[in-house]
């Protein structure tokens, strides 16, 4: 089923928390509008080493509570690793120019709540990221096959395509319409092979 992307964000799924680097713009990163890389992917801003070995995460590879996310964090410096939360917009943007509405179970193999938990009130919205689904079949219908739904690069940061889009200081898109435009462009141009998806990125207010 193919449908036009909605003009406003549809109801998103809360997929969990994790500690991740709140990384200052690396040397040589060409977009001076960006102060930090806060991408959904871990290609540049990374998660704590060894997190996957614990195998205590949910179907999206994150954590259902802040306490569980902290437990996976260990004794690393909290000034370098902020607490993030993520939401998933259930739309697949495929290389044919189509948009396919989804259920989270079709991507992650499990359903997720559509409402942010009460503890997420201490988080602020940083922006939308557009992310590669590298293991999608050519027709653009998602299917759960690998850890965390099979997501790879965030071309805004990984491929420096931020230079072509109105990103904010976190290398994310503040407006839904801009995220839709970027998802369509990436799905067509294929900077990384696959379909593309939009995620909401939130960070705990006390992050430094």
Image (cartoon, rainbow, N blue to C red):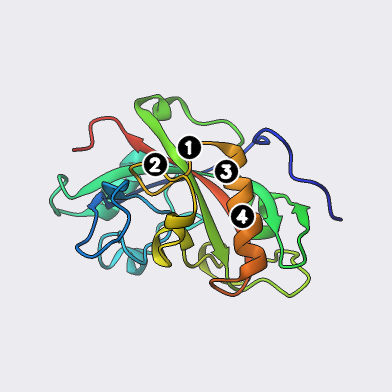
Residue 183 image offset from top left, x and y in percent? 61, 55
97 in relation to 7, above or below: below
Q: Secondary structure at mark 2?
A: loop
Disc sitting over residue 174 in the figure = 1
Read off the residue under disc 4: 183
Asked if one can make out residue 81 in the rendered structure from this viewpoint, the answer is: yes
Residue 110 located left or right of residue 96: left
How far apart are the two marked residues, 1 and 2, measured between alpha carbons?
7 Å
As drawn, the residue found furthest toward the right would be 1
Disc on the earlier residue, 1 or 2 = 2
Disc on the earlier residue, 2 or 3 = 2
Of residue 205 and residue 188, the one placed in the foreground of this image is 188
Dot 2 surroundings within 10 Å: few (below 14), some, or many (20 or more)? some
Disc sitting over residue 46 in the figure = none
Tell me which residue sits at (83%, 49%) in the image. Answer: 3
Q: Are marks 3 and 1 in contact (CB under 8 Å)?
A: yes
Q: Are marks 2 and 3 in contact (CB under 8 Å)?
A: no
Read off the residue under disc 2: 168
């Amino acid at each position: 089923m193919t449908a036009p992307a909605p003009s406003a964000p549809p109801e998103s799924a809360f997929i969990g928390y994790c500690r991740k680097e709140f990384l200052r713009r690396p040397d040589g990163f060409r977009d001076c509008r960006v102060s930090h890389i806060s991408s959904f992917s871990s290609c540049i801003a990374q998660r704590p080493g060894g997190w996957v070995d614990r195998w205590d995460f949910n179907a999206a590879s994150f954590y259902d509570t802040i306490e569980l996310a902290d437990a996976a964090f260990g004794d690393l410096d909290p000034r370098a690793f902020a607490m993030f939360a993520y939401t998933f917009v259930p739309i697949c943007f495929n290389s044919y120019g189509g948009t396919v509405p989804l259920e989270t179970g079709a991507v992650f193999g499990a359903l997720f709540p559509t409402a942010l938990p009460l503890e997420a009130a201490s988080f602020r919205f940083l922006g939308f990221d557009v992310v590669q689904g590298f293991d999608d079949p050519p027709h653009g219908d998602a299917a759960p096959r690998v850890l965390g739904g099979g997501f790879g690069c965030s071309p805004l940061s990984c491929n420096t395509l931020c230079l072509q889009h109105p990103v904010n200081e976190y290398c994310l898109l503040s407006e839904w319409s801009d995220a839709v435009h970027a998802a369509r462009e990436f799905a067509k141009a294929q900077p990384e092979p696959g379909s593309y998806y939009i995620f909401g990125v939130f960070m705990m207010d006390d992050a430094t």
